[in-house]
Amino acid sequence: MQLPELSPRRRMLVLAICCLSLLVVTMDSTIVNVALPSLRRDLGATVSSLQWTIDAYTLVLASFLMLAGSTADRVGRRRTFQVGLTVFGLGSLLCSVAPSAGWLIGARAVQACGGTMLNPVAMSIIANTFTDRVERARAIGMWGAVSGLSLGLGPIVGGALVDTAGWRSVFWINIPIVLVAIAGTALFVPESRSVRARRFDPVGQGLVILVLGCTVYAIIEGPRLGWLSSQILVLGTLAVVGLVGLLVYEPRRADPLLELRFFRSVPFSGATLTAIAAFFGYGSFLFLNALYLQDVRGLSALHAGLCTLPVALLIVVLAPISGRIVGKLGTRLPMVVAGTAMAAAGLALTWLTPTTSLVTLLGIYVLFGVGQGMVNPPITNSAVSGMPASMAGVAASVASTSRQAGITLGVAVSGSIVGTSLAQSATAFTTASHTVWWLTSVLGVLIVGLGLLTTNAAALESARRAAALFEGVDRAVSARAGAR
C-alpha cells in the first residue's frame, strides 16, 4: 500500500508519536524493577510473585511479537497501533488499582498484549513514512536514542515516584502519555498495509506459547513444587513436545510464524543465541539488583535508581558507536567487547557481599553498561544483514522475540536460584546470587565465542545461502507491487 507523500513536519510528528510508544513500553520494565521491593512489602508478594510480575509482561511480549507484526501488515498498521495503545493504557490502569499480587500479574499480561502491538508496528510505520534512505537512518537513530533515554529515565523516574507517591504511581505515568499518542495517531499517522501480508499461523502461535509458557512456569514454580514433581515433569514434557512440533510443522507452511530457514544462516543463529544470552544476563541483573540495593543495602527506591544510571548512560552513548563500528568493521569487535564486559561484570559480582562498597558496585555497573551498549547493534545487524527486504522485518522480529525471551528466562532462573534466601538474611541472599553471577559470566564468554564463530568466511557464506532461499519471495512482492 503506497503512502501519500507527507510533509517534513508531519513525518516528524509521526516519528514523535511512535517514539512515545517506545518510551512507555521500554521505561515500564525498568520502572517496575525499581518498585519490586515496595510491591513485596505492600502486597505481601513472594519472590515467585515478583518474578511473575516481570515475566507476565516479557513472556506475553515474547509470545506475540511476531504475530502482532504480521497482523498489522494485514489489517493496517495505524489501526493495530491504536488498539495497542488503548490496551496498554487499560493494562496500566488495571495495574495501578490491583488489590493483590495475583491481580497485578494479570494486569501486567494485559499491558503486554498492548505492548506487542506497539514497538514492532511503530518501527514498520517509521520505515514506511521515511522512504529516503538517509532520512530513514536518522529516524531510526532517533528511535534508538529514545530507547536508551527511556532506559535511563526508568529507574530514576520510577524511584522518585515510588518514594513520593507509592508503587502504583509508576503505572499512572503511562496513561497521559498513551492518551496523547492515541490522539496524535488519529490526527497524523496515515494508514498503511503490506503489499504481501503473511498469513496467520494459529498452530505455530499455539506451539510458541506452549514452549515458552511451560518452560517459564516450570522454572519459576520448580523450587516450590519440587523439580521432580509430577506437575514440573508434565510441563517439561509439554515444552519438549511443543518444540518438536515447531520443528516438524513450521517447515510445511508457506508463511510460518517461525521461519526456520533463517537458522541456516550462522550469523542469524548466532544473533538469536547472543540476544538470549545477553538479555538473560540483563534481566537477572535488573531483577536481583533492585532487591539487593533496597532490601539488602537499605537504599531508597530513588537512590537505587540513581545507582543504575551508569548502565543506562553507557547504553545511550555506546549503542550508536557500536552501530558505526558494525557498519565499518562488522559485528566481531562489538560482540567480543560486549561479551568480555559482561563476563567481567558477572565474575566481579561473584564476590558480592552485603557491605560491598558503592564505588565497587558502580564500577561493576559500568561493565554491565558497556556490555549492553555494545551488544544490540550486532544482534540486529546479524539478524537482518543480507536478508531480502521482504523478510528483513520478520527476521528482526525473531531477534526482538529472542531479547524478550532472554529477559524472561533471566528473571525466572535468577529468582528460582535465590528462592527464599532474601527472607533468611542479607548474607544468604548475596551468597545465593553468586550462582547467577557465575552463570552470567559464562554467558559472556559464550557471546565472545559467538562473535568469533559467526564472523568468519564460512559463516558469512551460510548467510548468503540462506538469503538466496527467499529471493523468490522478493520477486513475487515486486511483481505484485508493480501490478498495483
Image: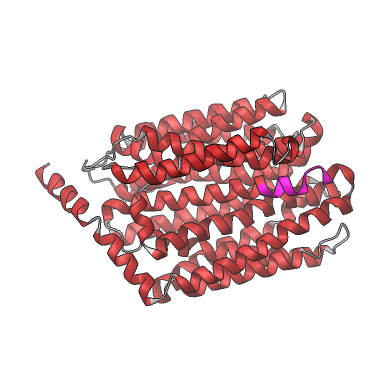
Q: Quadrant of residue 185?
A: top left
Asked if residue 416 lies in the magenta stretch, the reply is: yes
Asked if residue 450 lies in the magenta stretch, the reply is: no
Q: Which residues fall within the magenta stretch? A: 413-421
Task: Give above or below for 206 relative to 387.
Answer: above
Q: Position of residue 307 (x, y in %)?
A: 74, 57
The C terminus lies in quadrant: top left
Q: Quadrant of residue 442?
A: bottom right
Task: Give above or below for 108 relative to 480.
Answer: above
Residue farthest left in this picture: 483
Task: Give above or below for 131 relative to 453.
Answer: above
Residue at the spot 21% in from the left edge and 57% down from the top edge: 471
Residue at the spot 57% in from the left edge and 72% down from the top edge: 337
Q: Position of residue 317 (x, y in %)?
A: 56, 65
On screen, residue 396 versus residue 239, left or right, reads: left
Residue 292 visible, this orientation: yes
On screen, residue 292 versus residue 17, left or right, reads: right
On screen, residue 80 versus residue 172, left or right, reads: left
Q: Position of residue 73 (x, y in %)?
A: 31, 39
